[in-house]
Amino acid sequence: MNRDGERAALVLTGGGARAAYQVGVLAAIRELRGRSPGNPFPILCGTSAGGINAAALAVFSADFNAAVRKLVWIWRNFHVEQIYRTDPAALFGSFLRWGSALTLGWALRQTPRALLDNAPLGRLLAHVLDFSAIERAIAAGHLYAVSVNASGYTSGESLAFFEAAPQVQPWRRAQRVGMRAQLGVEHLLATSALPFVFPAVKIHREYFGDGSMRQLAPISPAIHLGADRILVIGAGRLAEEGRQRTDSYPSPAQIAGHALSSIFLDTLAGDLERLERINTTVGALTPAQREAAGIRLRPLETLAISPSRRLDTIAGRHRRSLPPLLRTVLGGMGAMRREGSTLLSYLLFEPPFTRALIELGYHDAHARRGEIADFLRL
């Protein structure tokens, strides 16, 4: 809990390699705080790659500054081989399985799991994160709650797996569930399992995929976990450019990139608009009036930071940093062309791209340092 008695929450959205932008914003926040002790975000909520960032901050929440330094170092030095396999056996085997399923699926009676094998990510997470530290951080008061979202392929529900102080209760809303769990590698692989790209993960009785799918209210977990103030760091521009004339048919990469952007961006923008309307309505009433009317809603202070530039444009400039074989494979889908760079931006875990995003996040946060300082009560 902060000095003013309020709990600030940090909400990190998804976006694959785009989540490097969040680390740049966090680096600027660390700098703005200076030597201030403690964890400025006792509530951490993340989805997809943002869920991995949130879990890392939770593990190291006893020292926020050190946690951010670790994240910056990792993201600045990422390579795709640490996230998914790019060797010939893995890539050709995957596309052979998909080709066989499309042409001979009626005979084989089996379906491929995903385009890419993200087993390296699982090994990396198990190596760098001590998940038992989350429980210790909560007991010591460094952390109040942390959650990661995943989407159930059978139930269609958006499930927030959370670890929190004992007083936090599970919740159930329409297509939204909060379930207490001891977070581990499987939860992070589930929340970041991009549809078709990475394999779904079975947790208990259901298979789960990327938490951004069917996540109608990305800010909701932070509210259920007890947040009074919420900082949202996105991984894509909330306001995209208008229509442009084109005569060429969209490539598979362009269609896939469009679908992923719809999953990651549209619900966040809508949830922020909805929260703003609620704040305006509830803020017009005094606490006494709200109590008399039986209105349990309360105004929530929110601050949203998103990239000032298109991340797919930046990805297009760094497309050649991918391994040659992977460039060839993605090139066949149209991902190496300008119109396919959106898909590329989710998969480009290479230093030239992640460092450019960290720098952009850092400068975007400094451009709004006054708002951030007010939010953090600095």
Image: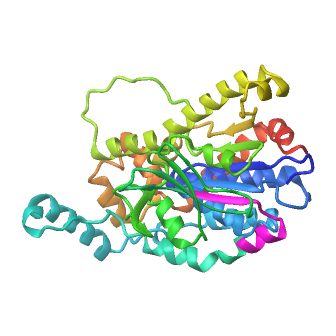
Percent across and percent down for residue 210 are: 46, 55
Residue 281 in the image: x percent, y percent?
A: 70, 21
Residue 159 appears in view:
yes
In the rendered structure, the answer to whether residue 128 lies left or right of residue 207 reads: right
Quadrant in which residue 173 is drawn: top right
Query: Where 258 sits versus 118, above or below?
Result: above
Determine the image quadrant of residue 285.
Answer: top right
Residue 40 against residue 130 in the figure, above or below: above
Pick the front one: 131 or 376? 131
Q: Is residue 71 left or right of residue 125?
A: right
* Viewer-nearest residue: 146 or 47: 146
Task: Identify the residue at image location x=55%, y=29%.
Answer: 239
Q: How many marks?
A: 0
Q: Is residue 311 magenta?
A: no
Task: Establish if 225 lies above or below 339.
Answer: below
Quarter of the image with the N terminus is bottom right
- Residue 50 % position (x, y): 59, 55
Q: Residue at x 66, y 56 (%)?
A: 169
Q: Quadrant of the C terminus?
A: top right
> Can you give x and y, in whole percent of width and height, for residue 342 in the image?
43, 44
Q: Is residue 338 visible?
A: no
The coloring applied to the image is rainbow
Q: Residue at x 71, y 33 (%)?
A: 297
- The residue segment tinted magenta is 135-148
